[in-house]
Image: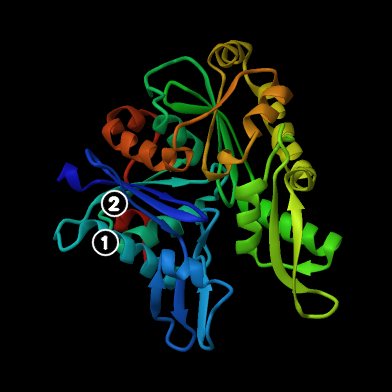
Amino acid sequence: MFGYDLGVDIGTSSVVISVVGKGVVLNEPSYIAYDNDSEKILYAGKRAYFLEGREPNGVAVIQPIKNGVVSNYSLGVQMLSHFFNKVLRKTVFRPRVVASVPSMSTEVDKRILISALINAGARSVCLIEEPLCAAFGTGVDPQNPSGTFVIDIGAGTADMAVVSQGSPSQIETLNIAGDVFDKAIADYVREKYGLLIGLRTAEEIKKNVGCAVPRKTEMSIVAKGRAEATGLPESVEITGDEICECLAPHLEKICDCAKAMFERTSPQLVADITDSGLILTGGSAQLYGIDILLSRALSIDVKVAPRPSLCVSKGCEAALKKMHILDKYGYTFKTKEEVRTR
């Protein structure tokens, strides 16, 4: 049944599932809380996400799939199965699944991910690079021969691609994205103020006052944590300019990688991109001023896609409708027998 086909964005921070004809039907953090002894899942999604850093004895919280790599196969299958069951409920149909994967994933990583998806309930799986899915999710037509430059900055990776005629012409992945930003903020607060904060607090600082370029109006937030020297509760005021300075070295690496992509791209495609501009997707594309920073670095227009964190999943859904085109570029569904799953 075509209506049971799923587009799945398995991100480091969240799993987003779209159903053909219905759009996004599930958006949950890709976290699970499980019992240490039995490895049985206790919670998955939002509840597990908020439990991280607050775990009781005997309970651990992890992300079983990070950067498109299955770090814990058994728990990864349980998490995906939980999310599939929420979407499909009691249907007897096993869906075809188009899932996103980081651009530079190895063949071994891809086979393990396909295996996990099939054992979680998929009938067959087709993996497509994240920036290509992101391009489709923003409305790029696979049959359009004009060049499009897409950068998808999620939690685990920054994936970028020059897309033409439904296929990537140039492609690159950086392990610099939202999680790296959060850790950089936590390290900065510890080094400057001697205050230990959790990654959840660092993420809140990033979302509320974080910026890639200085704001016209300064913003600040109070960060609460544990003083490194005394071990007692303490709070400090952090400004947006401080976070801008803290994130600058990481953002510069993303800009440098994008520049290198242009150097490898044909002049005609560069001309197309100059006309159409660069498209930013992914949750970290919502960082204030990141479009301005990239525009200054690359000398082209840069726009953030509407609801950027959902673009990859929407692109997976769009790909399901265009498989007759994508099949020409080697994007085909793999079954259990073809990948020799566990």
In primary-sequence order, the first of circles 1 and 2 is: 1
Label for residue 86?
A: 1
Q: Residue at x 56, y 77 (%)?
A: 54
Find numbered disc 2 in the image and state the secondary structure of the residue it sits on: strand
Classify 10 Å Cα crowding around label 1: few (below 14), some (14-19), many (20 and above). few
Between residue 323 and residue 199, name the one nearer to us: 199
Image depth: mark 1 or mark 2 in front:
1
Q: Does the rendering let one see residue 177?
A: no
Q: What amino acid type is highlighted by mark number 1?
A: Lys
- Residue occupying image coordinates x 53% and y 15%: 276
User: Which residue is rendered at x = 77% and y = 41% of the image?
Assistant: 248
The mark total stands at: 2
In the figure, is residue 311 to the left or right of 303? left
Is residue 97 found left or right of 140 in the rendered image? left
Residue 25, image x, y percentages: 29, 49
Give percent across and percent down for residue 230.
83, 80
Front in this rendered view, residue 145 or 35: 35
Where is 112 relative to 167, above or below? below
Q: Which amino acid type is shown beneath numbered disc 2?
A: Ser
- Left or right of 130 on screen, residue 87: left
Residue 3 falls in image quadrant = top left
Q: Secondary structure at mark 1?
A: helix
Residue 228 screen position, x and y as percent: 81, 74
Q: Which mark is residue 124?
A: 2
Q: Quadrant of the C terminus?
A: bottom left
